[in-house]
Image (tube, rainbow, N blue to C red):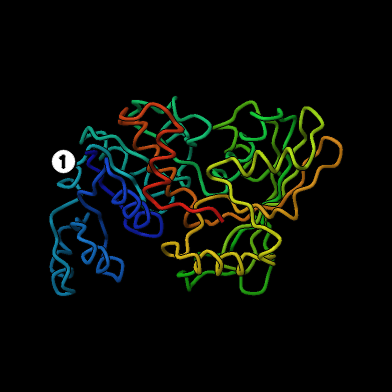
């Protein structure tokens, strides 16, 4: 069993913890929190040992009825690998801690590529992650872009990609962040960081991205144009999308035409936390004009990287060397059913 520690049991960390716990070849040996919270109480209910960065706060946890198993350093001693789920910019400061402990580590897309020197997407470069000590799982938007671009490139060849990211303003639980009544260019310059981030995984792809933030919390929406190397039919493209194990087609018969309706649909499907782990491509939007492919896809910012973290763990530990085998194992353990 691969012993996994989660440093930062927040939006991503708690989801990765549950995903790891569902795997037959992994176990959670502990999670960390900086202060008592509802999430910490849930972690206790799920049986995850709680570790803390500042042992001076142990009494505060005890008063909240949260037993403390030890320090973060104590947790790392028990782990084969740690998933860093701390806020963006914080994870980089933890690198020295992981190096001292001699433990493998995974960072999230909120950190720069340089923190690990390797950025990961299961379909694109799983084999290159085998045995590595440090890996960064790219952001939710970059994960969604990499999946579909790699699929189109493998099937038809990609000349260039142009994409607009319409990003959610904040996660649902964040109550102190806007915008409330604005569309904010993020950034106002072009390209946004998403295209260069894709190039850390798919360096040969010609991609330019633009991004904005809108006042919603549900998901991101991408408007994507991909110029292919040859003319293909819409049916050809849809066949590739349908066969992909982390792309879901939102079918016209559902009458879904918004992220809110898609989130509700996934919740009604019984998904944990109503999480959409796959790209949600709106089938009605898929269109070919000459060699140019157009479509919209929804990306659930809280969820799509979760399963990528699980695959990164297997690759880094060298337990499973075939990407499709790991992807299948992860999906099956999560009881991943198609949209």
Identify which residue is drawn at 53% across, 31% down: 124
In the shown orientation, is residue 86 left or right of residue 269? left
Which sits in the foreground, 256 or 119?
256
In terms of secondary structure, where does tag 1 sit?
Answer: helix
Q: Position of residue 160 (x, y in %)?
A: 74, 33
Q: Position of residue 235 (x, y in %)?
A: 75, 42
Which sits in the foreground, 149 or 88?
149
Quarter of the image where the C terminus is located: bottom right
Callout 1: 10 Å neighbours few (<14), some, many (20+)? some
User: In which image quadrant can residue 135 be found?
Assistant: top left
Q: Residue beneath label 1, please?
A: 77
Identify which residue is drawn at 28% across, 51% down: 21
Which sits in the foreground, 150 or 9?
150
In the shown orientation, is residue 100 left or right of residue 247? left
Identify which residue is drawn at 19% across, 58% down: 50
In the shown orientation, is residue 235 left or right of residue 106? right
Give the mark count: 1
Q: Position of residue 166 (x, y in %)?
A: 66, 57
Identify which residue is drawn at 40% across, 36% down: 326
Residue 161 higher or lower than 264, as above or below = above
């Amino acid at each position: 069993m691969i012993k996994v520690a989660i440093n930062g049991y927040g939006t991503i960390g708690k989801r990765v913890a549950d995903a790891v716990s569902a795997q037959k070849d992994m176990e959670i040996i502990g999670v960390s929190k900086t202060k008592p919270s509802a999430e910490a109480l849930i972690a206790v209910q799920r049986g995850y040992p709680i570790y803390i960065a500042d042992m001076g706060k142990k009494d505060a946890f005890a008063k909240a009825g949260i037993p403390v198993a030890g320090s973060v350093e104590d947790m790392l001693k028990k782990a084969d690998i740690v998933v860093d789920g701390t806020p963006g910019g914080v994870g980089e400061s933890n690198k020295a801690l992981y190096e001292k402990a001699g433990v493998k580590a995974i960072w999230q897309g909120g950190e720069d590529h340089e923190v690990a020197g390797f950025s990961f997407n299961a379909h694109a470069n799983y084999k290159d992650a085998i045995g590595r000590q440090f890996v960064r799982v790219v952001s939710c938007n970059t994960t969604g872009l990499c999946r579909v671009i790699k699929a189109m490139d493998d099937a038809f060849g990609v000349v260039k990609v142009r994409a607009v990211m319409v990003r959610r303003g904040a996660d649902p639980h964040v109550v102190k962040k806007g915008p409330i009544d604005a569309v904010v260019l993020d950034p106002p310059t072009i390209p946004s960081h998403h295209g260069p981030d894709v190039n850390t995984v798919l360096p040969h792809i010609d991609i330019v991205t633009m991004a904005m933030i809108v006042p919603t919390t549900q998901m991101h929406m991408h408007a994507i144009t991909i110029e292919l190397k040859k003319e293909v039919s819409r049916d050809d493209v849809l066949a590739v999308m349908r066969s992909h194990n982390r792309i879901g087609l939102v079918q016209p018969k559902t009458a879904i035409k918004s992220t809110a309706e898609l989130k509700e649909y996934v919740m009604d499907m019984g998904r944990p936390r109503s999480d959409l782990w796959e790209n949600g491509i709106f089938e009605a939007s898929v269109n070919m004009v000459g060699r140019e492919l157009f479509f919209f896809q929804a990306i659930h910012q809280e969820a799509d990287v979760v399963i990528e973290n699980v695959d990164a763990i297997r690759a880094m530990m060298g337990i499973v060397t075939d990407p499709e085998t790991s992807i299948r194992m992860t999906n099956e353990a999560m009881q991943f059913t198609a949209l």
